[in-house]
Amino acid sequence: MSDLLRKKTKPNKLLNRGQQITPNTTFTLDDVTSKSESKQPVTEAPAQKELETRTRTNKVQATTTTVRVSTPTKEKLNALVTMGIADSVDNLLEILIEEYESTYLTKEEKKQYSLILEIYAAKKKK
């Protein structure tokens, strides 16, 4: 019990951090998006038929994955495919995403969206 009351004298084992390190160059999201914007300008929404033909020709499916959705959402997607809006649920989702992107996203959100897609593509290449 007396060991608990005694103050133990041990050397201080704290790290010596040294000088504050600062980066040589800094950047903002605007710098990155302006570079990617100069590569590909944002275009307006194409007509529905052009959109469908473009999604059908872009069938570069290297891999597939599973997306979890609720049962009513699955049934709605399958109903739209059955009506003939698209050949498959994958094509239907591509059409819906492109329509949402061209209709509802602001210019700033489109920049952010394309930047995120570029990041995913870069991760996929590794």
Image: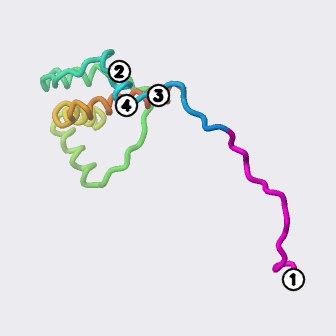
The answer to whether 68 is drawn above or below residue 24 in the figure is below
Question: Which class describes the residues within 10 Å of circle 4: few (<14), some (14-19), or many (20+)?
Answer: few
Residue 50 on the magenta segment:
no
Tell me the distance, in whole angstroms, between the alpha carbons under discs 2 and 1.
69 Å
Residue 79's disc number? none
Q: Earlier in the sequence, mark 3 or mark 1?
A: 1
Tell me the distance, in whole angstroms, between the alpha carbons under discs 2 and 4.
11 Å
> Which portion, as a residue range, is magenta?
1-18
Q: Earlier in the sequence, mark 4 or mark 1?
A: 1
Question: Which class describes the residues within 10 Å of circle 2: few (<14), some (14-19), or many (20+)?
Answer: some
Which residue is identified by label 1? 2
Q: Nearer the viewer, mark 2 or mark 4?
A: 4
Question: Which class describes the residues within 10 Å of circle 1: few (<14), some (14-19), or many (20+)?
Answer: few
Say left or right for 85 vs 68: left
Q: Quadrant of the C terminus?
A: top right
Q: Secondary structure at mark 4?
A: helix
Which residue is identified by label 3? 26
Say left or right for 47 vs 119: left
Q: Residue furthest front?
A: 19
